[in-house]
Image: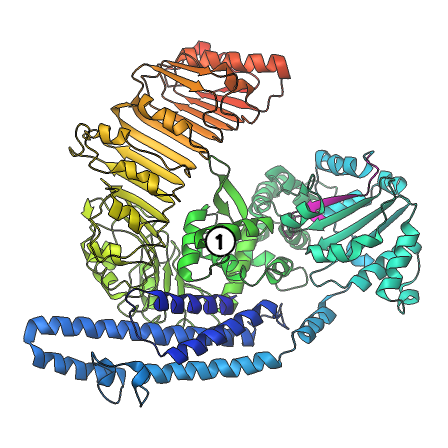
Amino acid sequence: MAAYAALVSLMNMIDSIKNHHSPPISLHKPQIQSLIEYGIFLLEFLQAYKSPVPNHDEADPLEMRIADAAYAAEDVIESHIVHKNQLTRSIKDATYAAGRSEVTKIRCSFNCFRGTKDSRNVSSNHNDDDDDEPNKLHQDMQNVIEEMDRIKRVAMETNAEEVVVLCDQRRRSVSSSIGRKSTGTMVFSDHVLHGIMEKLVADEPGRQVIPITGMGGIGKTALAQTVYSQQVIKERFDICAWATIFEHYNTREILCELVSQATNKDKKQLSESSEEELGLELYQYLSGKRFLIVMDDMWNIESWNEIQYFFPNNENNSRIMVTTRLSQLSSQLNSHYSHQVEFLDEASSWILLSKIVFGDERCTLELEKIGKEIANNCRGLPLSIVVVGGLLKNMEQSQECWATIRNNLTSVVNLDNDQDCLKLLKMSYNHLPVHLKPCFLYMGVFEEDDAISVSTLVKLWVCEGFLKPIDGRSLETIGKGFVKDLIDRNLILVDELGSTGNIKLVKVHDLVRDLCLNQAKKEGFYHVIGEYSPRGVNIQRRIVIRKTISKDKLLDDLQCMSHARSVICEHGKVPLCQNFELLRTIHAYKFRTFEYERYVNCLVSGYVNLRQLAVKAANMSSIFSSFNHFWNLQTLIVSCPCESIGPTEMWKMPQLRHIDFGRRLLLPDPPSDAGVMENLVVLEGALNFKCDKEVVKRIPNIKKLRIRYSGSKGMDDDDYYCLSNIKFLCKLESLHISSWYDFSGNASLYKIIFPRTLKSLTLDMEDHFEWENVLQKIGSLPLLEKFKLWEGCFGTGKWEIFDGQFPCLKYLGLFSIPSLKQWTAEASSIFPRLEKLRLFHINGLKNIPSEIGYIPTIQKIWMDFCGELVVTCAKEIVEEQMYLQGDDLPFLIQVRLPRNRNEALLNLAGPNFEVV
């Protein structure tokens, strides 16, 4: 929600100023303490607060009032920082240009501009704490504090329990008719149905919980209903009962419903019974009987913990089936099994839609093509298909009418009626803990169908101020945990895993994205240029620029957005305006041309409050010249075709967390007065990185380092770059080192001592670098999971794997190393945890160790453009394992041949061995 995000951002900003080595502003300590106290109180209040109108079209007024107060506090502080910087620069320029008298004139002009009553607030000797007559900053801050005090009194008068009860009375109704009502035709494969039914009827005597998991609207309840209604299930169990839990559950009502169904008593007979009496009656009636209980739409483990004791373990194959949107909850209910409901494929989507519209009749040929397009555009979500199907069923069966539905599908499925898809999905949003709500809403800033980089997403969350430190963990670690939590809640989807199983890319289903956009619009969380905003465009703080927006419309809207704090645009068309002086985030990175470069280069110097700058630039001069003013820059990502020498001011920016310059940044030596960059966790693109003791001392918490070397320094045995000091980077987890062909410092590279904390290592070396000199050191790294070798050479032509090496390696990649001829193992088992192996252009290799076929964790081997002998060897490994294990091997070998493919190798294709 906007209120929570605004408060956390404010608290983070105050903390940044308090802990800054050279704070950009002097703040009145009692006022700051008051802001902190109000912020803590309101954050705790929001964590417990439940809006009395969670499904109302308007945002909750109390939440928006809290957000506006936090925004106002940020405005006061950051505006003063901007104006102070403007004055400082004006005085500096005037000092050089016209002498002291001109400085006095500028100060007087600035005082008029700021509206102060005297010039003491800009005097170099002025102290805000000692000012008898409050200046504008002091007064503006006092106004904010007074508003927060008024909000606090309102919050204290709000009885959160009464609010929740009112919500529940309007929305909660535990009824068997709701739980078991017909949802119409659904499509489930025999494999899915049989899989769940096998778990229900399996000869496992203990009481078993069978979780069914998936996002809202994907068909969990329909699947449970289909299984529940099967005749074999009715005959299997003595008692079958169903209870729908809902978001805000009531244990007594759930027990009343179950007792009524189990005993056939009217619920009126049970109306006077207490929770304890109902629980005891249910327990006694179920004892000795084989029962099936369905707990539909469970939201938390507490509801299960409060009721599970009333289900006896009769050791007679009783079952409890639970549907939930929360994957984490399903694992708590059963750590060994849960069924994840998947999206429908294209064929199943069309079958479902056609059955809803036509029943047992066939669709006409003229409508089938457009009907399949409509079904496919529902993206496999049954709820969306059901809503669209219901509309198509009751309208004219013509291509023109159906084309209208196809072209306006989003508005169709979001109709404001009792069938509204978003209302069902919004339950998931309402149930999110308050710290996840802003992170979830932020998913709507990305383009439709975007594969979203997790690292990019987390960096944006950090710079937006959504995350706060927890238990000493880094903000990046916390952010990745939040991503995992949203995945477990089935609100975002995993799109691609990294080579070691980490989540690399995520996606958002179209309907869930619509939920983000609708809720964000209601709360004024961000504004999409060109779209209507119920709160108006002139107060918007986050601006999203879609790639479809016209330049004229873009310029018109931007002119009136002086409150903008963030500009998110992944195609780079960001014509930033002069009135964006309070901008904090510029994310404009996924683009291919330099058409709009001038906007970044000429204006970025005025954005003194920048936290993130992610752009493509023709040169770095204008950005580097602004470093003296970026007091709170945290993320700097610049793609630049030119080699650049970084300013020494970089070493005096303790807030920096992530630096990425591609491959072309020459870092200067840190000046003697530079501090420790404790927050820096990622440094990518450093050219000829000199890892001397002064550098190591200043980046103690670095986790990811990507460096490149070129030139003639580092000759012979000279360790000019001090690479042996890399071992002192004791928190380093990912290291990527590469060298250009003109680099002659191999001797220094041989002296690298790798820190034992490394989990990922990539080495990309010139042709004469001999791998034998470093492989033994690398093999002993205890935590290494990912290892890539690019080019270089094997002087002996042979790589021997010894016992105990690479104990945790999951991914191994060998790329373009023609000198490798033989690969042998001097151990009975190698790579005990290896999952993936990739060989690319390893033309001279004759074999791979047969022991690889015996690795229990191996999943896939890629062989791209490799020689005939090693491909044949791989085929022999597959045949050997098929002889020992059968045809259904746990791993696959995929071979990609060059254009002049060998027909004999094509004929090797078979089970577990693909050749393309």
Relative to 208, is 678 on the left or the right? Answer: left
User: Which residues make up the magenta segment?
Assistant: 204-221
Q: Nearer the viewer, residue 752 or 14?
A: 752
Tell me which residue sits at (30%, 49%) in the image.
Answer: 697
Q: Nearer the viewer, residue 749 or 650?
A: 749
Residue 739: x %, y % from top left: 25, 32
Relative to 54, is 118 on the left or the right? Answer: left
Residue 169: x %, y % from top left: 74, 71
Q: Is residue 133 above or below residue 276?
A: below
Question: Residue 692's image quarter?
Answer: top left
Identify the colour scheme used: rainbow
Tell me which residue sits at (50%, 47%) in the image.
Answer: 507
Residue 531: x %, y % from top left: 44, 64
Q: Which residue is mark 1?
A: 478
Residue 209: x %, y % from top left: 76, 45
Tell me which residue sits at (42%, 65%) in the image.
Answer: 12
Question: Residue 897's image quarter?
Answer: top left
Looking at the rendered structure, the kind of residue marked 1 is Ile
Question: Residue 797's image quarter?
Answer: top left
Relative to 414, is 610 on the left or the right? Answer: left
Q: Secondary structure at mark 1?
A: helix
